[in-house]
Image: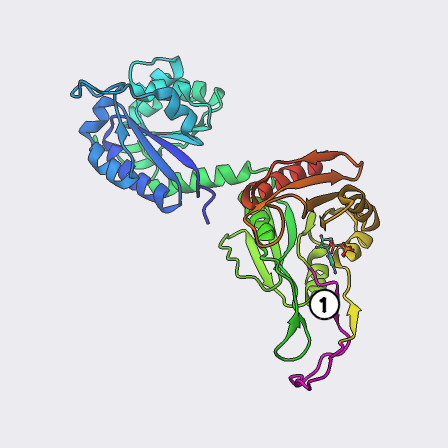
Amino acid sequence: MSVLSGKKILLGISAGIAAYKAANLVRLFIKSGADVQVVMTPDAKEFVTPLTLSTLSKNPVYSSFYNEEDENAMWNNHVDLGIWADLMIIAPVTANTLSKMANGSCDNLLLATYLSAKCPVYFAPAMDLDMYKHSSTKSSISKLTSYGNICIPATSGELASGLEGEGRLAEPEDILKFIEKDLCSKLPLRGKKILITAGPTYEAIDPVRFIGNHSSGKMGFEMAKAAANLGAEVKLISGPSSQKINHSFVHRIDVTNAEDMYLACHEHYDNVDVAICSAAVADYKPANLSTQKIKKKGSNLTLELIPTKDILASLGAHKKKQLLVGFALETNNERENATEKLKRKNLDLIVLNSLNDHGAGFALDTNKITIIDKNLNLQNFELKSKAAVAKDIIQVVIKELHA
Ligand code: CTP
């Protein structure tokens, strides 16, 4: 999955022959899972049509402050466009637009939007070689760089003038790669390895029956996604779950029972920076596994159960540098019980769910949590979707890593 997936990208296009390549850029952004809106300078429309760009982006394309042909026209709000965007890329940016951006000119919608944008701004120049070499252009580029904007340098090759040299717009595929690489390098969990357990465990009674629970695994999968989206390399060790995940930073390891989850966790634990145990591990398993299906006999059946290994406690006991996070699902004396677990299992953080909170718990799409740290500081969160709760937990983990 691309780091651009779900990102809101504002593409600015200025009036150069390379503007035709912007159509391909829109396509690549959309294929990466981004939402794209396009804003053009009025003259850019001579090089690539708004119809092409709106068809590819599935959004209206803006090029003026209002539509002059429509007397009921609304003002195209550059501030809203600027606020909407997670990132802005101006490609191609001509010498003229570069200079105006560098000097705060604001005589078209693209420039006004650029000045309003609070997000990271990338710009990819395209012009003839002598224009690109000119001190004035160099000074515009370095001014923009000093504002924190990021230049995607022009490449060398054949130019529209027929001359050969530096000034060609970087190829759309390379622009995409450049932005992906840059965003990845700035992610807060870049270089961090995180182990996450998720889902239930099934403890076999015989070849067809097991002891299990209703855990869906959703919370763990959402945390894996949230951490991976922030650059972490995730080992997701999951019990039987119908949840799906498709992320290049997530390595899913499927296990069935507590013993296999224990072994998988210990295999990877020494290499991780953070371990988050959200699995609803069965606390007991049958003392004897029947190799044949147990036949019903009409009389009562008694199963002897023995405790499974407490994975989280064993990780706590072997903790070196890892930040260790556990979960507690409680029905009474919630804080006291969670705090006791935090201490007993040698955790850094514990995420408490109370079954008394409406909307919290197994198999639901929502959760309401309190996070307690090892200094017994408490953070309460509202009832939220599990995806939003996962992001909250990962943010707290990031803070702890920097503490
Ligand atoms: N856990 C684990 N291995 C187990 C049991 C639990 O790793 N065999 C982890 C869970 O993933 C969770 C935390 O321990 O992060 C809390 O589990 P819970 O079952 O609530 O705690 P217990 O210590 O088993 O206490 P109790 O069942 O009495 O509440």
Residue 263, image x and y in percent? 71, 65
Residue bearing the label numbered 1: 259
Residue 155, image x and y in percent? 35, 35
Residue 138, image x and y in percent? 39, 21
Q: Is residue 240 left or right of residue 181?
A: right
Looking at the image, which residue is at 41% across and 35% down? 8
Q: Is residue 251 left or right of residue 301?
A: left
Does 139 appear above or below 315?
Answer: above
Looking at the image, which residue is at 74% across and 39% down? 372
Describe the colour scheme in one phrase.
rainbow
122 or 364, which is in the foreground?
364
261 or 152, which is in the foreground?
261
How many numbered marks, from 0 up? 1
Report if residue 192 is visible in the image.
Answer: yes
Please, which residue is most extreme toward the front here?
Answer: 298
Looking at the image, which residue is at 58% across and 50% down? 224
Q: Quadrant of ligand 1?
A: bottom right
Residue 263 falls within the magenta-colored stretch: no
Residue 292 falls within the magenta-colored stretch: yes
Magenta span main SS:
loop
> The residue under label 1 is which amino acid type?
Glu
Q: Considering the numbered disc 1 on the image, is that residue within a helix, a strand or a loop?
A: helix
Report if residue 137 is visible in the image.
Answer: no
Label 1 crowd bin: few (<14), some (14–19), many (20+), radius 10 Å: some
360 or 262, which is in the foreground?
360
What segment carries the magenta color?
281-302
State yes or no: Cβ of the residue under disc 1 lies below 8 Å from any atom of ligand 1. Answer: no
Residue 322, image x and y in percent? 74, 47
Does 288 appear above or below 69?
Answer: below
Assign the C terminus to one quadrant of the image. top right
Q: Tell me which corner region of the image, top left, top right, bottom left or bottom right, holds residue 253.
A: bottom right
